[in-house]
Image: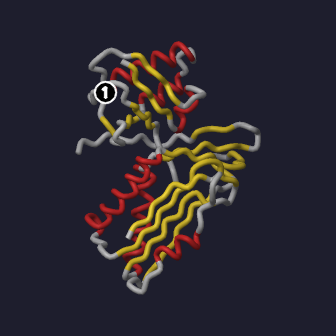
Amino acid sequence: MLHTDIIDSKVKKLSLIDAEKFIASNDFGASLIFSGTVRNQNNNKSVLGITYDSHDALVIKSFEEIYSEAEEKLNIKNKSVFIEHAKGYLNLGEISIIIAVACKHRDEAYVLSRFIIEEIKKRSPIWKKEHYTNNQSDWLKGNPIIYEKN
Amino acid sequence: MKVKIELFGAARDFNDQNLLELDLGQKTTIKDIRNKIIQYIDQKFNGNENYIKIINSSAFCSEKNNIVSDNYKITNNEKIGIIPPIGGG
């Protein structure tokens, strides 16, 4: 089971309760909820907030591919996965991403959760613009997406 | 032919409308688009080196939401997305 979404911060906030509800099942004995939040420091600069930008269709596609690949690469067949990412402006402490996973056993849950966040960092077209206390703002550098011939 | 380039991330700073409209010849490829955007930056932003670096390290996305190579041929009126280096989470 997979749930994915991009949440516009002007419309609603990401919810840990929604994630917990989605993955809840008697089929699974291990569940993990990872959340990423906006922190107040980066590269020795005082951060006030972050604007997230997203190519929504490509991001959702990448989430679906990562979910499918987890089955092929990690051999984790029975699982429930909830992935949501925010877009728009977020204040300090607000949640930018939730990855909730439920599996039969804890080993699978830890491996799967880590796999998903690392793949999102590499592949999902999401960008951050940090806003600083000195009224400046900067897009973070990021990693290029490499074209891979299918 | 006219090609619309949808801007994302750091490339949004290239234009207030988040979209570039380029006039290109027939049989245009992503490589031609990359060069045309660099020309635009040369004219509009006096060859801003950071912007040119962004263009050279960007991927491009077809209207069907596939990341495409520099040899990809654009169809008339196709909307192409520029995908600068990413970093979500």
The outermost residue toward the left is A150
Quarter in which the N terminus of chain B is drawn: top left
- x, y percent for residue A32: 49, 75
Closest to the observer: B14 or A119? B14
Residue lying at the far front in this picture: please name it. Answer: B77
Where residue A80 sits in the image (x, y, percent)? 40, 73
Q: Is residue A10 left or right of residue B14?
A: right
Please state which of residues A39 and A49 is positioned toward the viewer in this rendering: A49
Q: Amino acid at mark 1?
A: Ile
Q: Chain of mark 1?
A: B
The part of the image, by quadrant, that contains residue A35 is: bottom right
Label 1 SS: loop
| Crowding at mark 1 (Cα within 10 Å: few <14, some 14-19, many 20+) | many
- Asked if A3 appears above or below A135 in the picture, the reply is below
Above or below, comparing residue A133 to residue A27 in the picture: above
Residue drawn at (29%, 34%) of the image: B69
Q: Foreground residue, B6 or A113? A: B6
Q: Say whether residue A109 is left or right of residue B12.
A: left
Q: Number of marks in the image?
A: 1
Would you say A70 lies left or right of A139 here?
left
Residue at image point 51% right, 15% down:
B42
Q: Nearer the viewer, residue A41 or B2?
A: B2
Q: Position of residue B16 (x, y in %)?
A: 60, 28
Residue topped by disc 1:
B74
User: Residue shown at 36%/37% (left/top)?
Assistant: B63
